[in-house]
Image: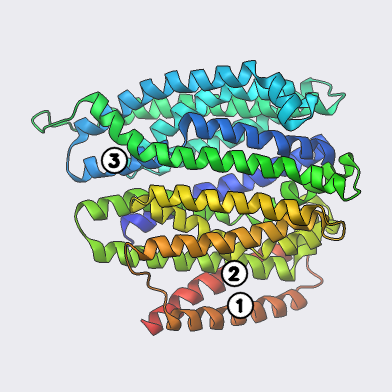
Amino acid sequence: MKIDKFYKETIVLSISNITMGLFRFVFSIILSKKLGSEGLGLYSIILPIYDLFCCLSCGGLVSAISSRGAEFVTKGNNLNLIKTIRVTAIFDFIWSLIIALLMFFNSSAISIYILKDIRSITSLRMISIAIIFISLSNVLKGYFLSLSKASIPAFIDIFEKVVRISMVLLTFHLIKVVDIPTAVTLVFFALCMGEGFSLLMLIIFYKTTRKKIIINYNVKSESMPQLLIQVLIIAIPLALNGFLSSILGTASTLILPRRLVSSGIPYETALSMIGEFSGMAVSIILFPSVIISAISTIIVPEISGSLATKNFFKVEKRIGDVIRVSLYLGIATLIICSIIPKDLGILFFNKASIYKYIFTAALCCPLYFTLYTTYGVMSGIGKQKDILLNSLIISILDIIILYIFGGISWINIYAYAITLFLTSLVGVILNIISIRSFTKIRFGKYQLISTCIITILTALIVAILNNLLINFNCFLKTLIVILVAFSSMILGGIKIDRLFE
C-alpha cells in the first residue's frame, strides 16, 4: 500500500526525533552523573533563559518559512522561495547578533536579579553565542521543510546531538572539574559547539540542493522586502507567543525553588528535587513527544499546501487523524509509566526512588501531547493570534497554580505535576474551540468509545505482560512493555477507528 507524502515525512522526522530522543536520554544520564542533582537543578533554571532569548531572536521562523515556502513550491514559484530564504537569513543574522550581544553584556544582571544565583554568569555568556547559530539554522530548516525534505534537517539534528554528547565527554575528560558552575558552563559550551556544527552542515546541504532547484524567471516574483514582511507577519505573532510564554515559563521555573524553600525545604534540596522531577522524571514521560514534535512540524506546510489548492476535505481529515494519534500516544505513555515506573527510573537514571515522580508527571501525557499537536494545526490554518492568546492564558495559569501549590509543604514538588495537568487541560479546550471555528474535528462519540475500549485492552495486556516478565532483565522487560503498549494503543486505535467510520 502506498504511503502518502505527509506520513512519509512524519515517519522520517519521527525516526530522527526518536533517535535524538535517545541521544537526549543519554545526554540526561550523562548530565545526572557529571553534574549531580544540584548541578542538574542549576542547569534547569539557566536553560529557560536561553529558550527565552532564542524565542526573541528566531521564534516562529521555521513555521513561517515552511508555510510560505510550501505555497510557493505548490504554485511552482521557486524564485520567491530562494529570495525569501536570502532576505530572511540576512535579517535574522543582524537581529540575532543584537540579541546575543544584549544577553552577553547583561549576563551579570540576569544572574543576580533574575536567577538569583551568581554561579550562572559564565554559562549565560557561553550560550549567548549559540543564539546566532540556532537562528540561522531555523531559516534553513524552514527551507528544507518547504521542499518536503525533512530528512536533511532530521539527519543534521542527530549529528548535532552526537557532537554535543561527544563534546561533553571530551571536555570533562580533558578538564578537571572542581565545582558545579564550571561543570554547567562546560555543558553549555558543548551545546554551543553542537549548534555551530549543525549550522555548518545545513549551509553545505543548502548549497547542494539549491543547484538542483529549477527556477522559472518568467514567473512573477515579489520584492525581497515584501517577501520578508510576509514571513514576519506569520513569524512575529508566533515569536511573540514564544517570547511571552518563555518569560512566564521562566518565571514559573524561578518561582518553584522559592516556593519550595518557603514551605520549609532547604535551597540545595529544592534544586535536587527539581533536578529529579524535571530533569529525570519529565524527561522520561516526554520521550514519546518526539513523534508529536514531528507531527506538529510537518502538519504546518501540509495544511498550508492543501489550503492553497482549496482541498478542505483533506485538511479536515488530516486534523482529525493527527489529534487522535497524539491522544493514543499520550494514553500509551500514561499506561507504561503507571505500570513500570520503577523499572523506568532504574533503567535510565539508576534511581528507583523517582517512580512516584514518573507516575504523577505521566498523568498529563494524553492532554499534553494533544495540546502540542493542536498548536501545529492552528499554525497551519493561520490561527496565530489564537495561539498567542491561548498560550498567554496557559502560561499565566501555570504561574498561579505553581505559586499556590508549590508553597504547600505536603504537596511540594508535586505542584509541578498538578500544573502540567491543569494547564494542558485548559489548553486543549481553548485550542479545540479555536480549531472548530475553522473546520470540523472528526472525533465524535464513536471515536470516544473506541478510545476507551483500546485503552482498557492495552492496560490489561501491559499489566499481564509485566507480571509474566517479572524475572526478565530490566532492559529487555522495559523494551518489550514499551513496544507492546505503543503498538497495541496506536495500531489498535487506528483499526477500531476505521470500524466506526
Residue 5 lies in quadrant: bottom left
Q: What residue type is labelled 1?
A: Thr
Q: Residue at x 54, y 32 (%)?
A: 54
Residue drawn at point x = 47 percent, y = 57 percent: 373
Question: Left or right: 248 with respect to 58?
Answer: right
Q: Which mark sits nearer the N-terminus, 1 or 3? A: 3
**Residue drawn at the location 76% of the way across and 25% of the way down:** 112
Judging by the rendered image, the residue that carries numbered circle 1 is 458
Mark 1 surroundings: few (<14), some (14-19) or many (≥20) residues within 10 A: many
According to the picture, the residue beneath numbered tag 3 turns out to be: 68
Q: Tell me: residue 1, above or below residue 132.
A: below
Q: Position of residue 39 (x, y in %)?
A: 81, 35
Q: Where's the C terminus, which quadrant?
A: bottom left
Which is more toward the observer, 168 or 434?
A: 434
Label number found at residue 421: none
Residue 12 seen in the figure? no
Quarter where residue 184 is shown: top right
Of callouts 2 and 3, the N-terminal one: 3
Which residue corresponds to mark 2?
331
- Mark 1–mark 3 CB contact (< 8 Å): no
Q: Residues within 10 Å of mark 2 (few under 14, many from 20)?
A: many
Q: Are marks 2 and 1 in contact (CB under 8 Å)?
A: yes
With 87 as the anchor, is 201 left or right in this view? Answer: right
